[in-house]
């Protein structure tokens, strides 16, 4: 069965962005030739879901969405036509994930943002969490995990520390 995996970076105090969707804190751990396992991870994925604000940020930074090989679902409130392999999805995201998990294929990568992550956390749909902790305390911004979600037990699969100070934690969700 396919797994829904969150693969994301955050500050030590749990922020995925500074105010105004500023991701410059991620530059602290940029090392030429180091992708922190992303290449290996993305090879296990054939579907990506993300919120519209995350999608907009990527398009603004890159000029277009760079992944043409995978099915992409952008979770949004505004209906739009397909854009190549990108579907703008306005229906119940929990139902979408349950439907995708039933299909044959590789894993499903949730690339954020916080609203989407927390919606999926409330429904206990994540099978794994891969969280890279950037060695900085931001103090303000967009929190990865918001209050009001149900308790969820996790089992540590691995932890890896890097010379840049980044620590990557990989957890498996336990029980439903």
Image (cartoon, helix red, strand yellow):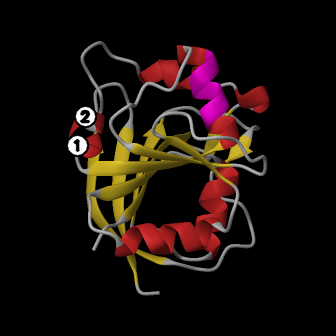
Q: Crowding near pointer 2: few (<14 within 10 Å), some, many (20+)?
A: few
**80 vs 16, nearest the viewer:** 80
For the residue labelled by badge 2, is the local secondary structure a helix, a strand or a loop?
helix
For the residue labelled by badge 1, is the local secondary structure a helix, a strand or a loop?
loop
Any part of residue 172 in sight: yes
Q: Nearer the viewer, mark 1 or mark 2?
A: 1
Residue 58 falls inside the magenta stretch: yes
In space, the residues marked 1 and 2 are separated at their CA atoms by 6 Å
**19 vs 133, nearest the viewer:** 19
Please report the residue visible at 39 percent of the width from the left and 51 percent of the height from the top. Answer: 47
Question: Mark 1 touching mark 2, by CB under 8 A?
Answer: yes
Please report the residue visible at 39 percent of the width from the left and 57 percent of the height from the top. Answer: 108
Residue 152 falls inside the magenta stretch: no
Determine whether 3 is above or below 54 in the image: below
Please report the residue visible at 28 percent of the width from the left and 26 percent of the height from the top. Answer: 163
Q: Which residue is mark 2?
A: 39
Q: Position of residue 65 (x, y in %)?
A: 50, 26
Please report the residue visible at 59 percent of the width from the left and 80 percent of the height from the top. Answer: 151
Any part of residue 23 in sight: no
Q: Position of residue 139 (x, y in %)?
A: 73, 38
Q: Read off the magenta span.
A: 55-60
Q: Which residue is mark 1?
A: 43
Q: Position of residue 24 (x, y in %)?
A: 60, 20
Q: Position of residue 143 (x, y in %)?
A: 69, 48
**94 vs 173, nearest the viewer:** 94
């Amino acid at each position: 069965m396919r797994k829904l995996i969150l693969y994301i970076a955050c500050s030590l105090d749990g922020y995925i962005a500074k105010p105004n969707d500023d991701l410059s804190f991620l530059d602290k751990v940029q090392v030429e030739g180091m992708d922190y396992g992303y290449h290996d991870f993305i090879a296990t994925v054939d579907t990506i879901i993300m919120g519209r604000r995350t999608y907009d940020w990527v398009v603004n930074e890159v000029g277009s969405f760079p992944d043409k090989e995978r099915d992409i679902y952008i979770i949004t409130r505004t209906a739009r036509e397909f854009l190549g392999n990108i579907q703008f999805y306005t229906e119940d995201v929990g139902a979408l994930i349950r439907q995708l998990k039933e299909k044959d294929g590789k894993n499903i990568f949730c690339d954020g943002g916080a609203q989407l992550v927390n919606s999926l956390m409330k429904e206990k749909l994540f099978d794994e969490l891969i969280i890279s902790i950037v060695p900085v305390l931001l103090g303000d911004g967009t929190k990865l995990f918001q209050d009001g979600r149900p308790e969820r037990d996790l089992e540590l699969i691995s932890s890896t520390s890097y010379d840049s100070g980044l620590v990557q934690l990989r957890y498996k969700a336990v029980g439903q």
